[in-house]
Amino acid sequence: MGKTVKLTESDLVKIVSRIINESDDDFKSRLRQMVDSSMKSPRFINMAKEYIEPYLASGCVSYRQTEKYFIVNVDAPYCFEDNGFDKFQGRKIKDKLRGLQFQSTGVGQYVKEIFK
């Protein structure tokens, strides 16, 4: 009997990306377009919003959304500690955002391109 393996959408995207890298150029370009459009899905933005929501009121995390981008700012570890959170929570949030394919643009700022 086979084993059942649960994959998140981001895990599946990583697997497909690896397949793309090992495939011919025409196939790569078609698959890359599919993956890129999937990663810009509003679902990833909603996952990020749900994850950072507990930290918004403290001011340790903030976000803004433009027509084309979703931008998250994560404050320094002392902000989390001063507001009663684990001082490593900021690092965990940054790791989660990177896992959702957000790009770091500088100290504590993460951006993801979106479409509707």
Image (tube, helix red, strand yellow):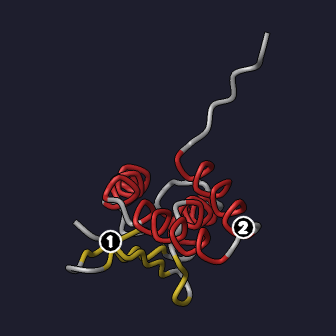
For this rendering, which residue is in front, 64 or 28?
Answer: 28
User: At 35% across and 52% down in the image, what residue appears?
Assistant: 43
Q: Position of residue 28 (x, y in %)?
A: 61, 71
Picture residue at 62% right of the left edge, 49% below the top:
11
Q: Position of residue 33 (x, y in %)?
A: 46, 71
Name the residue that disc number 2 marks. 23
| Image location of residue 32, percent across then percent down | 54, 70
Q: Position of 46 compared to 17: left or right?
A: left
Q: Residue at x 32, y 71 (%)?
A: 114
Work out which residue is located at the far top of the displayed protein and give it.
1
Q: In the depicted view, which residue is nearer to us: 103 or 9?
A: 9
Element type where label 1 sits in the image: loop
Q: Which residue is mark 1?
A: 114
Residue 110 in the image, given as x and y percentages of width and height: 48, 77
Given contact means CB atoms under 8 Å apart, are the residues at marks 2 and 1 in contact?
A: no
Q: Is residue 107 above or below residue 6?
A: below
Task: Report the amino acid beneath label 2.
Answer: Ser
Amino acid found under the numbered disc labelled 1? Ile
Q: Say which quadrant the C terminus sits in.
A: bottom left
Which numbered marker is on residue 86?
none
Q: Quadrant of residue 91?
A: bottom right
Left or right for 107, reference 44: right
Using residue 85 as the reference point, say whether residue 25 is left or right of it. right
Q: How many marks?
A: 2
Q: CA distance from mark 2 to mark 1?
A: 27 Å
Earlier along the polypeptide chain: callout 2 or callout 1? Answer: 2
Q: Secondary structure at mark 2?
A: loop
What residue is at 27 percent from the left and 75 percent from the top? 64
Q: Local crowd at mark 1 within 10 Å, few (<14), some, or many (≥20)?
A: many
15 on left or right of 97: right
